[in-house]
Amino acid sequence: MKITTPSKIILNNIRVVNPSESKDEVVSLMIEQGVISYYCLQPFTETVSDNSTKVIDGTDLVCAPGFYDMHVHLREPGQEYKETIQTGTNCAANGGFTGVCCMPNTAPAIDHPAIVEYITNRAAHTLTEVHVTAAITKERKGKELAPLLELYKSGVVMFSDDGSCITDSAVMRRAFEYLAPIDALLSQHCEDHALTEGFVMNEGAMSALLGVKGYPTVAEEVMIARDIMLAQYLGNRRYHVSHLSTSGGIELVRSAKARGQRVSCEVTPHHFTLTDASLHEYDAHYKMNPPLRTSADIAAIIEGIKDGTVEVIATDHAPHARHEKLVELGLAANGILGLETSIGLSLTHLVHAGHITLARLIELMSINPRKILNLPDIRIAQGASANLTILAPNEEWTYNVETTKSLSRNTPYHGWNMKGKPRYAINRGIIAECTL
Ligand code: DOR
Protein backbone atom coordinates (compact mmCIF):
# COMPACT_ATOMS: atom_id res chain seq x y z
CA MET A 1 0.00 0.00 0.00
CA LYS A 2 1.29 3.41 -0.93
CA ILE A 3 0.21 6.32 1.30
CA THR A 4 0.78 9.88 0.06
CA THR A 5 -0.48 13.38 0.74
CA PRO A 6 -0.47 15.11 -2.66
CA SER A 7 -1.66 18.71 -2.65
CA LYS A 8 -4.05 17.91 -5.49
CA ILE A 9 -5.92 14.68 -6.33
CA ILE A 10 -7.79 14.46 -9.63
CA LEU A 11 -10.32 11.75 -10.46
CA ASN A 12 -11.23 11.96 -14.13
CA ASN A 13 -14.41 10.42 -15.58
CA ILE A 14 -15.38 8.41 -12.53
CA ARG A 15 -18.79 6.96 -11.65
CA VAL A 16 -19.94 8.53 -8.37
CA VAL A 17 -22.46 6.38 -6.50
CA ASN A 18 -23.92 7.82 -3.30
CA PRO A 19 -27.47 6.69 -2.54
CA SER A 20 -27.78 9.18 0.33
CA GLU A 21 -27.56 12.00 -2.23
CA SER A 22 -29.42 9.97 -4.92
CA LYS A 23 -26.28 10.16 -7.05
CA ASP A 24 -25.18 7.74 -9.76
CA GLU A 25 -23.34 9.76 -12.42
CA VAL A 26 -20.03 9.99 -14.26
CA VAL A 27 -18.12 13.15 -13.30
CA SER A 28 -14.63 14.48 -12.64
CA LEU A 29 -13.43 15.61 -9.22
CA MET A 30 -10.57 17.68 -7.93
CA ILE A 31 -9.52 17.42 -4.27
CA GLU A 32 -7.30 20.11 -2.71
CA GLN A 33 -6.27 20.20 0.96
CA GLY A 34 -8.71 17.38 1.69
CA VAL A 35 -11.72 19.19 0.22
CA ILE A 36 -13.54 18.55 -3.06
CA SER A 37 -12.73 21.82 -4.81
CA TYR A 38 -14.33 20.97 -8.16
CA TYR A 39 -17.09 18.53 -9.13
CA CYS A 40 -17.88 18.81 -12.81
CA LEU A 41 -18.80 16.97 -15.98
CA GLN A 42 -15.63 17.70 -17.98
CA PRO A 43 -12.37 15.90 -17.15
CA PHE A 44 -9.40 18.01 -16.03
CA THR A 45 -6.61 18.66 -18.51
CA GLU A 46 -3.89 17.26 -16.23
CA THR A 47 -3.39 13.61 -17.13
CA VAL A 48 -0.01 12.84 -15.59
CA SER A 49 0.82 12.61 -11.90
CA ASP A 50 3.83 14.42 -10.47
CA ASN A 51 5.08 14.98 -6.94
CA SER A 52 2.27 17.28 -5.93
CA THR A 53 -0.62 16.11 -8.13
CA LYS A 54 -2.10 12.63 -8.28
CA VAL A 55 -4.20 12.02 -11.40
CA ILE A 56 -6.45 8.95 -11.53
CA ASP A 57 -8.26 7.77 -14.64
CA GLY A 58 -11.66 6.79 -13.27
CA THR A 59 -12.73 4.63 -16.21
CA ASP A 60 -14.18 1.37 -14.76
CA LEU A 61 -13.90 2.74 -11.20
CA VAL A 62 -16.59 3.78 -8.73
CA CYS A 63 -16.30 6.62 -6.25
CA ALA A 64 -18.32 5.95 -3.09
CA PRO A 65 -18.60 7.64 0.31
CA GLY A 66 -15.78 6.26 2.48
CA PHE A 67 -16.52 2.74 3.71
CA TYR A 68 -16.95 2.26 7.45
CA ASP A 69 -16.48 -0.90 9.54
CA MET A 70 -18.29 -0.55 12.86
CA HIS A 71 -16.82 -3.71 14.44
CA VAL A 72 -13.05 -4.14 14.55
CA HIS A 73 -10.50 -5.20 17.15
CA LEU A 74 -7.41 -3.00 17.06
CA ARG A 75 -5.92 -4.72 20.15
CA GLU A 76 -4.32 -1.58 21.55
CA PRO A 77 -3.78 -1.06 24.42
CA GLY A 78 -2.37 -4.32 25.70
CA GLN A 79 -2.20 -6.83 22.86
CA GLU A 80 0.14 -5.09 20.44
CA TYR A 81 1.65 -8.40 19.36
CA LYS A 82 -1.63 -9.07 17.48
CA GLU A 83 -2.34 -5.58 16.08
CA THR A 84 -1.80 -1.93 16.88
CA ILE A 85 -3.81 1.16 16.06
CA GLN A 86 -1.25 1.94 13.35
CA THR A 87 -1.22 -1.53 11.73
CA GLY A 88 -4.98 -1.95 12.14
CA THR A 89 -5.76 1.38 10.48
CA ASN A 90 -3.23 0.62 7.71
CA CYS A 91 -4.98 -2.68 7.16
CA ALA A 92 -8.34 -0.85 7.12
CA ALA A 93 -7.11 1.67 4.53
CA ASN A 94 -5.68 -1.16 2.42
CA GLY A 95 -9.11 -2.80 2.59
CA GLY A 96 -10.79 0.44 1.45
CA PHE A 97 -12.09 1.70 4.81
CA THR A 98 -11.85 5.35 5.83
CA GLY A 99 -13.43 4.77 9.24
CA VAL A 100 -13.65 2.03 11.84
CA CYS A 101 -15.13 1.61 15.29
CA CYS A 102 -12.92 -0.36 17.67
CA MET A 103 -14.10 -2.79 20.33
CA PRO A 104 -13.39 -2.58 24.07
CA ASN A 105 -11.93 -6.03 24.79
CA THR A 106 -8.42 -4.61 25.07
CA ALA A 107 -6.12 -4.96 28.08
CA PRO A 108 -7.15 -3.01 30.07
CA ALA A 109 -10.69 -2.90 28.71
CA ILE A 110 -11.99 0.43 27.39
CA ASP A 111 -13.97 1.22 30.52
CA HIS A 112 -12.45 4.59 31.43
CA PRO A 113 -12.26 7.95 29.57
CA ALA A 114 -8.43 7.92 29.82
CA ILE A 115 -8.30 4.88 27.55
CA VAL A 116 -10.67 6.49 25.06
CA GLU A 117 -8.41 9.55 25.04
CA TYR A 118 -5.34 7.36 24.51
CA ILE A 119 -6.90 5.65 21.47
CA THR A 120 -8.27 8.87 20.01
CA ASN A 121 -4.86 10.53 20.29
CA ARG A 122 -3.08 7.58 18.68
CA ALA A 123 -5.50 7.76 15.75
CA ALA A 124 -5.60 11.54 15.37
CA HIS A 125 -3.74 11.58 12.05
CA THR A 126 -4.42 8.17 10.52
CA LEU A 127 -6.14 8.03 7.12
CA THR A 128 -8.73 5.70 8.61
CA GLU A 129 -10.55 7.45 11.44
CA VAL A 130 -11.11 5.52 14.63
CA HIS A 131 -14.21 5.82 16.78
CA VAL A 132 -14.50 3.97 20.04
CA THR A 133 -16.96 1.50 21.53
CA ALA A 134 -16.65 1.58 25.29
CA ALA A 135 -17.43 -1.27 27.66
CA ILE A 136 -20.83 -1.29 29.36
CA THR A 137 -19.44 -2.82 32.54
CA LYS A 138 -16.21 -2.41 34.50
CA GLU A 139 -13.50 -4.69 33.10
CA ARG A 140 -16.24 -6.20 30.88
CA LYS A 141 -17.19 -8.45 33.76
CA GLY A 142 -20.93 -7.99 33.29
CA LYS A 143 -21.48 -7.00 36.93
CA GLU A 144 -21.00 -3.29 37.65
CA LEU A 145 -21.66 -0.48 35.18
CA ALA A 146 -18.67 1.41 33.79
CA PRO A 147 -18.87 5.24 34.09
CA LEU A 148 -21.19 5.43 31.08
CA LEU A 149 -21.90 9.15 31.05
CA GLU A 150 -18.22 10.10 31.47
CA LEU A 151 -17.34 7.68 28.68
CA TYR A 152 -20.02 9.23 26.50
CA LYS A 153 -18.63 12.71 27.19
CA SER A 154 -15.18 11.47 26.16
CA GLY A 155 -16.57 10.81 22.69
CA VAL A 156 -17.49 7.13 22.47
CA VAL A 157 -20.10 6.30 19.86
CA MET A 158 -21.43 2.99 21.18
CA PHE A 159 -21.38 0.76 24.26
CA SER A 160 -20.81 -3.01 24.28
CA ASP A 161 -18.96 -5.64 26.31
CA ASP A 162 -18.01 -7.29 23.01
CA GLY A 163 -16.28 -10.64 23.29
CA SER A 164 -18.72 -11.47 26.04
CA CYS A 165 -22.39 -10.90 26.76
CA ILE A 166 -24.13 -9.27 29.70
CA THR A 167 -26.29 -12.17 30.76
CA ASP A 168 -27.56 -10.49 33.97
CA SER A 169 -30.81 -8.85 32.87
CA ALA A 170 -30.80 -6.38 35.77
CA VAL A 171 -27.39 -5.03 34.72
CA MET A 172 -28.57 -4.69 31.13
CA ARG A 173 -31.72 -2.95 32.30
CA ARG A 174 -29.66 -0.47 34.31
CA ALA A 175 -27.44 0.24 31.33
CA PHE A 176 -30.45 1.01 29.15
CA GLU A 177 -31.83 3.28 31.87
CA TYR A 178 -28.56 5.18 32.43
CA LEU A 179 -28.17 5.82 28.72
CA ALA A 180 -31.80 6.79 28.13
CA PRO A 181 -31.42 10.56 28.82
CA ILE A 182 -28.68 10.84 26.19
CA ASP A 183 -30.25 8.23 23.89
CA ALA A 184 -26.87 6.50 23.44
CA LEU A 185 -26.53 3.23 21.53
CA LEU A 186 -26.18 -0.09 23.35
CA SER A 187 -24.87 -3.06 21.44
CA GLN A 188 -24.61 -6.65 22.54
CA HIS A 189 -22.49 -9.68 21.72
CA CYS A 190 -25.44 -12.03 22.15
CA GLU A 191 -24.43 -15.27 23.86
CA ASP A 192 -25.90 -17.05 26.84
CA HIS A 193 -22.59 -18.24 28.28
CA ALA A 194 -24.27 -20.95 30.36
CA LEU A 195 -25.34 -22.59 27.09
CA THR A 196 -22.01 -22.19 25.30
CA GLU A 197 -19.46 -23.14 27.95
CA GLY A 198 -16.51 -24.94 26.36
CA PHE A 199 -17.90 -24.55 22.83
CA VAL A 200 -15.71 -25.15 19.81
CA MET A 201 -18.16 -24.64 16.94
CA ASN A 202 -21.82 -24.52 15.96
CA GLU A 203 -23.94 -27.22 17.58
CA GLY A 204 -25.23 -29.50 14.86
CA ALA A 205 -24.44 -32.48 12.69
CA MET A 206 -20.84 -31.40 12.09
CA SER A 207 -20.03 -30.88 15.79
CA ALA A 208 -21.50 -34.33 16.50
CA LEU A 209 -19.42 -35.84 13.71
CA LEU A 210 -16.22 -34.18 14.93
CA GLY A 211 -17.04 -34.98 18.55
CA VAL A 212 -16.63 -31.44 19.84
CA LYS A 213 -18.78 -29.24 22.04
CA GLY A 214 -21.32 -27.13 20.17
CA TYR A 215 -22.71 -23.60 20.54
CA PRO A 216 -26.44 -23.85 19.85
CA THR A 217 -28.16 -21.13 17.85
CA VAL A 218 -30.61 -20.66 20.69
CA ALA A 219 -27.78 -19.41 22.94
CA GLU A 220 -27.50 -16.39 20.65
CA GLU A 221 -31.21 -16.00 20.11
CA VAL A 222 -32.34 -15.98 23.76
CA MET A 223 -30.10 -12.97 24.36
CA ILE A 224 -31.32 -11.12 21.26
CA ALA A 225 -34.91 -11.80 22.32
CA ARG A 226 -34.31 -10.67 25.90
CA ASP A 227 -32.57 -7.46 24.86
CA ILE A 228 -35.26 -6.61 22.34
CA MET A 229 -37.87 -7.08 25.08
CA LEU A 230 -35.91 -4.94 27.54
CA ALA A 231 -35.34 -2.23 24.93
CA GLN A 232 -39.06 -2.13 24.23
CA TYR A 233 -40.11 -2.24 27.90
CA LEU A 234 -37.75 0.61 28.80
CA GLY A 235 -39.24 3.00 26.25
CA ASN A 236 -38.03 1.90 22.83
CA ARG A 237 -34.31 2.27 23.54
CA ARG A 238 -31.71 2.16 20.72
CA TYR A 239 -30.16 -1.29 20.44
CA HIS A 240 -27.76 -2.93 17.96
CA VAL A 241 -27.06 -6.67 17.62
CA SER A 242 -23.39 -7.44 16.90
CA HIS A 243 -22.31 -10.09 14.40
CA LEU A 244 -25.71 -11.78 14.15
CA SER A 245 -25.33 -15.32 12.81
CA THR A 246 -28.60 -17.27 12.95
CA SER A 247 -31.84 -17.41 10.97
CA GLY A 248 -33.80 -17.15 14.23
CA GLY A 249 -31.89 -13.98 15.12
CA ILE A 250 -32.79 -12.44 11.77
CA GLU A 251 -36.45 -13.21 12.43
CA LEU A 252 -36.29 -11.59 15.89
CA VAL A 253 -34.80 -8.37 14.50
CA ARG A 254 -37.23 -8.36 11.58
CA SER A 255 -40.27 -8.56 13.87
CA ALA A 256 -38.88 -5.94 16.27
CA LYS A 257 -38.42 -3.54 13.37
CA ALA A 258 -41.94 -4.30 12.15
CA ARG A 259 -43.21 -3.23 15.60
CA GLY A 260 -41.37 0.06 15.24
CA GLN A 261 -38.49 -0.70 17.59
CA ARG A 262 -35.20 1.15 17.15
CA VAL A 263 -33.27 -2.08 16.71
CA SER A 264 -30.52 -2.70 14.15
CA CYS A 265 -28.08 -5.51 13.41
CA GLU A 266 -24.86 -6.24 11.58
CA VAL A 267 -23.62 -9.41 9.89
CA THR A 268 -20.07 -10.37 8.95
CA PRO A 269 -18.83 -11.58 5.56
CA HIS A 270 -17.77 -14.90 7.13
CA HIS A 271 -21.31 -15.58 8.27
CA PHE A 272 -22.65 -15.25 4.72
CA THR A 273 -19.78 -17.00 2.89
CA LEU A 274 -18.81 -19.98 5.09
CA THR A 275 -20.57 -22.76 7.00
CA ASP A 276 -19.61 -25.08 9.86
CA ALA A 277 -18.80 -27.74 7.25
CA SER A 278 -15.47 -25.91 6.78
CA LEU A 279 -14.33 -27.27 10.15
CA HIS A 280 -14.15 -30.86 8.88
CA GLU A 281 -10.33 -30.80 9.17
CA TYR A 282 -10.33 -29.12 12.60
CA ASP A 283 -8.75 -26.00 11.09
CA ALA A 284 -8.89 -23.14 13.62
CA HIS A 285 -8.97 -20.55 10.82
CA TYR A 286 -12.69 -21.35 10.74
CA LYS A 287 -13.17 -20.86 14.48
CA MET A 288 -14.91 -17.73 15.63
CA ASN A 289 -17.54 -16.42 18.01
CA PRO A 290 -20.37 -16.61 17.05
CA PRO A 291 -19.40 -19.74 15.14
CA LEU A 292 -19.97 -20.46 11.46
CA ARG A 293 -23.51 -21.78 11.10
CA THR A 294 -25.33 -23.64 8.30
CA SER A 295 -26.40 -22.92 4.73
CA ALA A 296 -29.96 -22.31 6.00
CA ASP A 297 -28.60 -19.53 8.22
CA ILE A 298 -26.69 -18.04 5.28
CA ALA A 299 -29.90 -18.04 3.22
CA ALA A 300 -31.75 -16.24 6.03
CA ILE A 301 -28.95 -13.67 6.44
CA ILE A 302 -28.98 -12.92 2.71
CA GLU A 303 -32.75 -12.58 2.80
CA GLY A 304 -32.33 -10.17 5.74
CA ILE A 305 -29.76 -8.17 3.79
CA LYS A 306 -32.14 -7.98 0.85
CA ASP A 307 -35.25 -6.93 2.78
CA GLY A 308 -33.53 -4.35 5.02
CA THR A 309 -33.58 -6.33 8.29
CA VAL A 310 -29.78 -6.28 8.17
CA GLU A 311 -28.55 -2.71 7.92
CA VAL A 312 -24.80 -3.19 8.25
CA ILE A 313 -21.97 -5.41 7.09
CA ALA A 314 -19.13 -5.30 9.64
CA THR A 315 -16.11 -7.58 9.82
CA ASP A 316 -15.36 -8.35 13.48
CA HIS A 317 -11.70 -8.05 12.32
CA ALA A 318 -10.06 -10.15 15.07
CA PRO A 319 -6.28 -10.50 14.68
CA HIS A 320 -4.59 -13.32 16.58
CA ALA A 321 -0.97 -14.48 16.60
CA ARG A 322 0.09 -17.77 15.01
CA HIS A 323 0.58 -19.53 18.31
CA GLU A 324 -3.00 -18.71 19.30
CA LYS A 325 -4.45 -20.29 16.16
CA LEU A 326 -2.07 -23.13 15.29
CA VAL A 327 -3.07 -25.24 18.26
CA GLU A 328 -5.73 -27.88 18.74
CA LEU A 329 -9.18 -26.60 17.85
CA GLY A 330 -10.57 -26.51 21.37
CA LEU A 331 -7.72 -24.30 22.58
CA ALA A 332 -7.55 -21.95 19.58
CA ALA A 333 -8.60 -18.30 19.87
CA ASN A 334 -11.85 -17.20 18.24
CA GLY A 335 -11.82 -14.83 15.29
CA ILE A 336 -10.34 -13.98 11.91
CA LEU A 337 -9.01 -10.98 10.01
CA GLY A 338 -11.66 -9.13 8.05
CA LEU A 339 -10.68 -5.67 6.87
CA GLU A 340 -8.92 -6.56 3.61
CA THR A 341 -11.42 -9.16 2.39
CA SER A 342 -14.72 -7.51 3.33
CA ILE A 343 -15.27 -5.47 0.17
CA GLY A 344 -14.12 -8.28 -2.15
CA LEU A 345 -16.29 -10.91 -0.47
CA SER A 346 -19.33 -8.63 -0.34
CA LEU A 347 -19.04 -7.57 -3.97
CA THR A 348 -18.51 -11.18 -5.08
CA HIS A 349 -21.08 -12.96 -2.95
CA LEU A 350 -23.78 -10.31 -2.69
CA VAL A 351 -23.53 -7.93 -5.67
CA HIS A 352 -22.12 -10.14 -8.44
CA ALA A 353 -24.18 -13.06 -7.11
CA GLY A 354 -27.24 -10.93 -7.94
CA HIS A 355 -28.63 -10.51 -4.41
CA ILE A 356 -28.21 -6.72 -4.07
CA THR A 357 -27.14 -3.70 -6.11
CA LEU A 358 -23.89 -1.82 -5.69
CA ALA A 359 -25.86 1.13 -4.26
CA ARG A 360 -27.35 -1.12 -1.57
CA LEU A 361 -23.87 -2.42 -0.71
CA ILE A 362 -22.73 1.17 -0.23
CA GLU A 363 -25.62 1.68 2.19
CA LEU A 364 -24.60 -1.44 4.14
CA MET A 365 -20.88 -0.63 4.28
CA SER A 366 -20.77 3.15 4.45
CA ILE A 367 -24.02 5.04 4.94
CA ASN A 368 -25.89 2.90 7.47
CA PRO A 369 -23.07 2.27 9.97
CA ARG A 370 -22.41 6.02 10.09
CA LYS A 371 -26.11 6.72 10.54
CA ILE A 372 -26.45 4.16 13.36
CA LEU A 373 -23.44 5.67 15.15
CA ASN A 374 -24.74 9.23 14.63
CA LEU A 375 -21.69 10.18 12.57
CA PRO A 376 -21.97 12.87 9.89
CA ASP A 377 -23.28 11.83 6.50
CA ILE A 378 -20.70 11.98 3.70
CA ARG A 379 -21.45 14.17 0.68
CA ILE A 380 -19.63 13.88 -2.61
CA ALA A 381 -20.05 17.43 -3.83
CA GLN A 382 -18.11 20.65 -4.30
CA GLY A 383 -17.02 22.03 -0.93
CA ALA A 384 -17.40 18.76 0.97
CA SER A 385 -14.51 17.03 2.76
CA ALA A 386 -13.17 14.24 0.58
CA ASN A 387 -13.90 11.01 2.47
CA LEU A 388 -14.01 8.45 -0.32
CA THR A 389 -13.56 4.82 -1.22
CA ILE A 390 -12.63 4.15 -4.82
CA LEU A 391 -13.69 0.70 -6.00
CA ALA A 392 -12.75 -1.40 -9.01
CA PRO A 393 -16.03 -3.34 -8.88
CA ASN A 394 -15.30 -5.79 -11.69
CA GLU A 395 -11.61 -6.52 -11.17
CA GLU A 396 -10.83 -10.16 -10.52
CA TRP A 397 -8.16 -10.95 -7.94
CA THR A 398 -6.92 -13.50 -5.43
CA TYR A 399 -6.36 -12.70 -1.77
CA ASN A 400 -2.82 -13.35 -0.59
CA VAL A 401 -2.51 -12.93 3.17
CA GLU A 402 1.27 -12.65 2.89
CA THR A 403 0.71 -9.09 1.63
CA THR A 404 -1.54 -8.12 4.54
CA LYS A 405 -0.98 -4.89 6.45
CA SER A 406 -2.20 -6.57 9.62
CA LEU A 407 0.31 -7.86 12.16
CA SER A 408 -1.55 -11.17 12.12
CA ARG A 409 -2.29 -13.75 9.42
CA ASN A 410 -5.38 -15.57 10.69
CA THR A 411 -7.70 -15.77 7.71
CA PRO A 412 -9.52 -18.63 6.00
CA TYR A 413 -9.64 -16.58 2.77
CA HIS A 414 -6.01 -16.94 1.66
CA GLY A 415 -6.10 -17.99 -2.01
CA TRP A 416 -9.78 -17.12 -2.52
CA ASN A 417 -10.73 -15.64 -5.88
CA MET A 418 -12.92 -12.56 -5.78
CA LYS A 419 -14.50 -10.11 -8.19
CA GLY A 420 -14.32 -6.47 -7.14
CA LYS A 421 -11.86 -4.75 -4.83
CA PRO A 422 -11.00 -1.42 -3.25
CA ARG A 423 -8.49 0.59 -5.28
CA TYR A 424 -7.99 3.75 -3.17
CA ALA A 425 -9.05 5.14 0.20
CA ILE A 426 -9.04 8.94 0.52
CA ASN A 427 -9.52 10.88 3.75
CA ARG A 428 -7.95 13.75 5.75
CA GLY A 429 -6.04 14.82 2.61
CA ILE A 430 -4.30 11.44 2.49
CA ILE A 431 -4.62 8.85 -0.28
CA ALA A 432 -3.85 5.16 0.11
CA GLU A 433 -3.36 3.02 -2.95
CA CYS A 434 -4.69 -0.38 -1.94
CA THR A 435 -2.39 -3.29 -2.78
CA LEU A 436 -4.47 -6.42 -2.55
O1 DOR B 1 -14.48 -14.36 17.07
C1 DOR B 1 -14.43 -13.42 17.85
N1 DOR B 1 -13.27 -12.81 18.18
N2 DOR B 1 -15.58 -12.99 18.43
C2 DOR B 1 -15.58 -12.07 19.39
O2 DOR B 1 -16.65 -11.74 19.85
C3 DOR B 1 -14.32 -11.51 19.91
C4 DOR B 1 -13.27 -11.59 18.90
C5 DOR B 1 -11.88 -11.30 19.44
O3 DOR B 1 -11.73 -10.33 20.20
O4 DOR B 1 -10.94 -12.01 19.08
Image: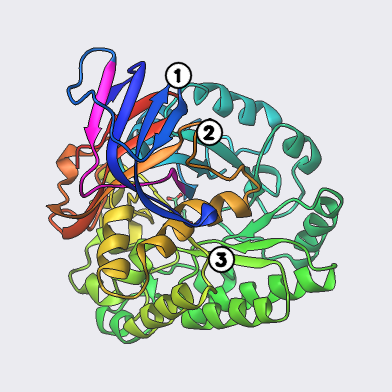
**Location of residue 81 (image quadrant):** top left
**Nearest the eye: 196 or 253:** 253
Q: Residue at x 26, y 23 (%)?
A: 54
Q: Which residues are magenta?
A: 53-68
Q: Work out how far the residue at label 3 is from the one at label 1, CA to CA, in angstroms.
A: 36 Å
Q: Residue at x 45, y 19 (%)?
A: 33
**Could you tell me if residue 161 is visible in this image?**
no
The amino acid type of the residue labelled 3 equals Cys
Quadrant of the rendering where the N terminus is positioned: top left
Q: Residues within 10 Å of mark 3 (few under 14, many from 20)?
A: many
187 with respect to 428 (left or right): right
Residue 369, position as x, y percentages in the image: 54, 53
**Which label number is shown at residue 334?**
none
**Which label number is shown at residue 33?**
1
Q: Work out how far the residue at label 1 is from the one at label 2, CA to CA, in angstroms.
A: 11 Å
Task: Give the label, 3 or 1, closer to the camera.
Answer: 1
Instruction: Please name the residue that numbered disc 2 is placed on.
Output: 384
**Nearest the eye: 267 or 26:** 26
The amino acid type of the residue labelled 2 equals Ala
Q: Earlier in the sequence, mark 3 or mark 1?
A: 1
Instruction: Please name the residue that numbered disc 3 is placed on.
Output: 265
The answer to whether the residues at label 3 and label 2 have Cβ atoms under 8 Å apart is no
The answer to whether the residues at label 3 and label 1 have Cβ atoms under 8 Å apart is no
